[in-house]
Amino acid sequence: MTQPKEIFAITDRCVGCRTCTIACAVAHSASKTLFGAVAETPRPKSRIYVEWAPPAHKIPLVCRHCEDAPCMHACISGAIRRTDDGVVVTDADKCIGCWTCVMVCPYGMIGRDLERHKAYRCDRCPDRDIPACVAACPTGALVYQTVPAYAADVRRHASSEMVKGKGS
Amino acid sequence: MDSAQAYVIVGGSAAGMAAAQAIRQRDPAAGITVLSEEADAPYFRPLIPYLVSGRKQAADMMLAGSGPYTGQNIQVWTDARVAAVDCNAQTVTLADGRQLGYGKILFATGSRPFLPPEIRGTDIEGVFALRTLDDARRMAKRAEVTRRAVMLGGGLLNLKAAFALLERGIRVTLVVFSPEVLSQLMDPDDALLIRRALDQAGLEIRTGSAAREIMRDQSGVCAVGLDDGSEIACQMVCIGKGVRPNVDFLAGSGVRTGGGIVADRFTACNQPNTFAAGDVAVTYEPVSGRPIMTALWTNAVEMGRCAGLNMAGVPTVYSGTFGILNATQVADMPFVAMGTVHTRNLDAEIHRHASADAYRKLVFDAEGRRLVGAVLVGDITNAGIYRYLIREKRDITAVKRQIVRHRLHYGHLLAI
């Protein structure tokens, strides 16, 4: 399996504009357009959440597709599986809306679609090259990268900060 | 002896199949044989009420290939009931006389319904204790000639069975000895909203009553006699009075049992190369450390996976489980109950909040620094974060306000 890309959130960069949540809901709507999406019933739902924590943190949160996904093992109907790309997906046809996944997700990342009585979560936009939330983020707070590439970026950034610190 | 396998798993449900899957992930080649006494291939047991309601077929419930159960080359023997285990020779003998040797063995035989001996007539046709896919098939068949059913016991399984029958247009009466339904999962006061939803959904509930006798006519069940002398005419009875672990096959094997099978923190039993997981195993509760047994799919999978890892040579501590860890939705009312939720006479700090369509009870320890239990009814958002806090015994002082107001999100935990 090739190393899959993941969605990383750089919380310092998030300004809490929630553009990502709108882009996510539109990407998971029937019409795929903003104007179409707002008129749809049931209302299209975002799978990414921007929360606020005191004093002034804005924190984008999205399913981590955990390596040892508690939701997948806890599911009592076999509705949750991992794809070859490492994405943990919920099969809406198999989901019975028992909310066991909601009870075991330590991040609170599984939504409940009350109209359809189904659980939903981030699917990393399988039909897009870059997930809609990442593509829409105006401040670069969301990054779509493999773990090694993202870690290399973080190291590079940290070392350049250190060099700068020495020079001054 | 007919043959020997590196891994033999007794029991083909949640714990057994999760263990088989975990072993297969660590060891692509080893022989794994699962012995199941049922005639059906392994299936998702919690789905069987859907066979009764007609919403799903048996083929929709099969475990192999669904969810995480994708491991290849796991042999499953159905109709294979283990009659005896010889821990010295490392063999099992099946009820039909076949023998099988093992390198390592897992006991994941689960539990069976408890039929209270004080109720007369539990063997009459039309009396069920919904446990297996085959029970569900027979129940669905009987439902065709049933106009009214009586459910004995107010637990979750019986509620699910009751709703399956209601969906088929059958009149259903639930007889509960406790003062309120779901008494194992919450205090009576916590169940008010659920009770109202059940009432509105058309379920008739008689609390504080016990069945004494089930009566028959030529077509099977015809009535249930209650302890107050009244009778309810019905064509079906479903008993949901808890379960008992299946340990009889271990008689004389030397494997230590005490209620269920006693397993250590690495899921191992007292005999060499023996392990136990699932409903049949005695495990412990992480908050209090007390030994408990549970009968929950989710717990059984978790312990089964842990046992599978230990069997495959990856030492893994089983971190125990809450005795109460339930999420579900009955009558359009979702709820979660987990950890310590029975708070009468408990030295604890309790926060309750009730509105027209939601209720929550959050239970903290006496010092108010740790969350020990939660009941969420109606709004179960982020329940998993509460579970995490309870299980890890986190000091929650910094986020207590958010917990009490049910505003907690994962971002709060990042910020503290």
Image: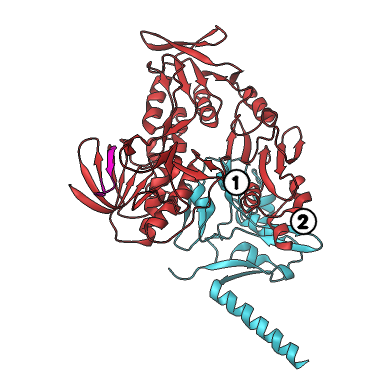
Q: Give the crowd class for mark 2: few <14, some 14-19, many >=20 residues within 10 Å.
A: few
Q: Chain of mark 1?
A: A
Residue range corresponding to the magenta coloring: B82-91
Report if residue B315 is visible in the image.
Answer: yes
Q: Residue at x 59, y 32 (%)?
A: B184
Q: B415 and A38: which one is in front? A: B415
Q: In red, which chain?
A: B
Q: B33 and B4: which one is in front? A: B4
Residue B84 lies in the magenta stretch = yes
Q: Residue at x 39, y 41 (%)?
A: B43
Where residue A45 sits in the image (x, y, percent)?
65, 50
Numbered disc 1: secondary structure: helix
Q: Residue at x 68, y 56 (%)?
A: B410
Q: Give the crowd class for mark 1: few <14, some 14-19, many >=20 residues within 10 Å.
A: many
Look at the picture and state if A100 lies above or below A123: above
Which residue is the extreme one toward the left? B2
Q: Colour of chain A?
A: cyan
Look at label 1 and name its amino acid: Met
Disc assigned to residue A103: 1
Q: Which residue is mark 2?
A: B398
